[in-house]
């Protein structure tokens, strides 16, 4: 067989050269289009579940949240391993599948089982969701926004990262998620004055009920008049502290008791769990993670181009 191939190649030199040249051209074209992955995916197809259970200790999270989800996910087809991490008010469940499993089919299977298993979770679970498609080796870039208190506050810097920079980076094809760390997260904090509440006869339940129904729009249907339909709406959504301070929480002697009379209402940072820094000073850091099939080099260039445009549009922010 070997002699036949050698003799046939010698008798058809031009054909061999033409085939070799065509293969070289095809290989060169394929090389230019082949994605470059600096950090290849070394783990099996994996689906991540993220659950927030505010106020629960790690032992309670493990018993009431993590263990039921692990038991529900262990019997899925193609699952090779289920592991979890339980901390204060947080639970992460990692479901790994066989090599070659389609990640979208794996997410569909986990999502269907997760919908059923959520009914068994306790009432204290505030948020439960499925994480984006990413890899353990997929963090391609860390973007630091230094905080200069003389020019901009830590709260404003975090808001810029959350509502300007993060959505812009998520719009780049190939970016799986952008995780901001550091700064101060703005909150509307209501701090009751127990002495004033006791003096005016306002209970904690009344205060809670008033706050739960505040700043929400509601619909009253529509009314038909002169062959036209008019939409009836109650517009209560607002971000002004003045509107919240004027919220009635109770009534006494025919007069309403306002929230500002029994509590302090102000914008304040949320309680921190960790912080970030850059060059010895405070900063907001965004971790950019790519999708498993994204070209790392091309994605890095696209991110750098987007950051350069954002920097020229907002020169007061140093990225």
Image (cartoon, rainbow, N blue to C red):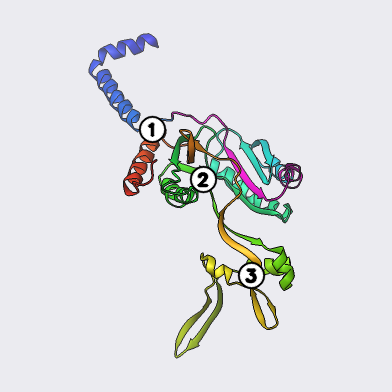
Q: Which residue is mark 3?
A: 261
Mark 3, Cα crowd under 10 Å, few <14 / some 14-19 / many 20+, is some
In this rendering, position of residue 50 left or right of residue 286: right
Could you say which quadrant of the image residue 294 lies in? top left
In this rendering, position of residue 33 left or right of residue 64: left
- In the image, residue 225 sits, relative to residue 120, either above or below, namely below
Residue, far top: 3
Q: Which residue is mark 2?
A: 183
Q: Position of residue 235 (x, y in %)?
A: 52, 73
Q: Nearer the viewer, mark 2 or mark 3?
A: 3
Most foreground residue, 237 or 220: 237
**Mark 2 → mark 3, Cα distance in angstroms:** 31 Å
Residue beneath the point at 71% across and 43% down: 66
**Total of numbered circles in the picture?**
3
Q: Which residue is mark 1?
A: 297
Q: Position of residue 301 (x, y in %)?
A: 36, 36
Residue beneath the point at 38% across and 42% down: 318
Q: Position of residue 158 (x, y in %)?
A: 49, 48
Q: Nearer the viewer, mark 3 or mark 1?
A: 3
- Could you tell me which secondary element the residue under label 2 belongs to? loop
Q: Where's the N terminus, which quadrant? A: top left
Check if mark 3's residue and mark 1's residue have beta carbons within 8 Å: no
Q: Nearer the viewer, mark 2 or mark 1?
A: 2
- Can residue 55 be seen in the rendering of this structure? yes
* Highlighted magenta segment, given as a residue range: 38-67
In this rendering, position of residue 244 left or right of residue 143: right
Could you say which quadrant of the image residue 264 lies in? bottom right
In this rendering, position of residue 94 left or right of residue 203: left
């Amino acid at each position: 067989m070997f002699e036949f191939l050698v003799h046939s190649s010698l008798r058809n030199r031009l054909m061999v050269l033409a085939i070799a040249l065509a293969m070289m051209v095809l290989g060169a074209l394929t090389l230019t289009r082949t994605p470059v992955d600096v950090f290849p995916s070394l783990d099996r197809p994996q689906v991540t579940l993220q659950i927030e259970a505010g106020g629960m200790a790690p032992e309670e999270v493990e018993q009431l949240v993590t263990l039921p989800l692990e038991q529900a996910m262990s019997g899925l087809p193609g699952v090779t391993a289920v592991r979890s991490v339980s901390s204060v008010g947080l639970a992460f469940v990692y479901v790994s599948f066989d090599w070659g499993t389609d990640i979208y089919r794996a997410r569909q299977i986990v999502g269907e089982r997760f919908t059923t298993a959520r009914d068994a979770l306790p009432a204290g679970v505030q948020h439960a969701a499925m994480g984006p498609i990413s890899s353990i080796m997929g963090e391609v870039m860390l973007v630091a926004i230094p905080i200069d208190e003389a020019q901009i506050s830590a709260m404003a810097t975090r808001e810029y990262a959350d509502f300007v920079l993060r959505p812009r980076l998520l719009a780049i094809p190939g970016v799986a998620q952008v995780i901001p760390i550091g700064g101060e997260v703005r909150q509307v904090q209501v701090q009751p004055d127990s002495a004033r509440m006791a003096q005016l006869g306002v209970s904690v339940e009344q205060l809670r009920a008033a706050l739960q129904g505040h700043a929400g729009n509601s619909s009253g249907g529509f009314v038909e008049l002169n062959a036209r339909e008019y939409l009836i709406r109650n517009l209560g959504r607002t971000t002004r502290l003045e509107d919240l301070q004027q919220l009635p929480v109770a009534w006494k002697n025919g007069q309403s008791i306002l929230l500002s009379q029994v509590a302090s209402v102000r914008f304040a940072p949320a309680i921190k769990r960790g912080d970030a820094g850059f060059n010895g000073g405070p900063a907001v850091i965004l971790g950019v993670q790519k999708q498993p099939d994204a070209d790392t080099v091309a994605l890095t260039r696209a991110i750098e181009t987007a950051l350069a445009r954002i920097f020229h549009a907002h020169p007061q922010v140093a990225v």
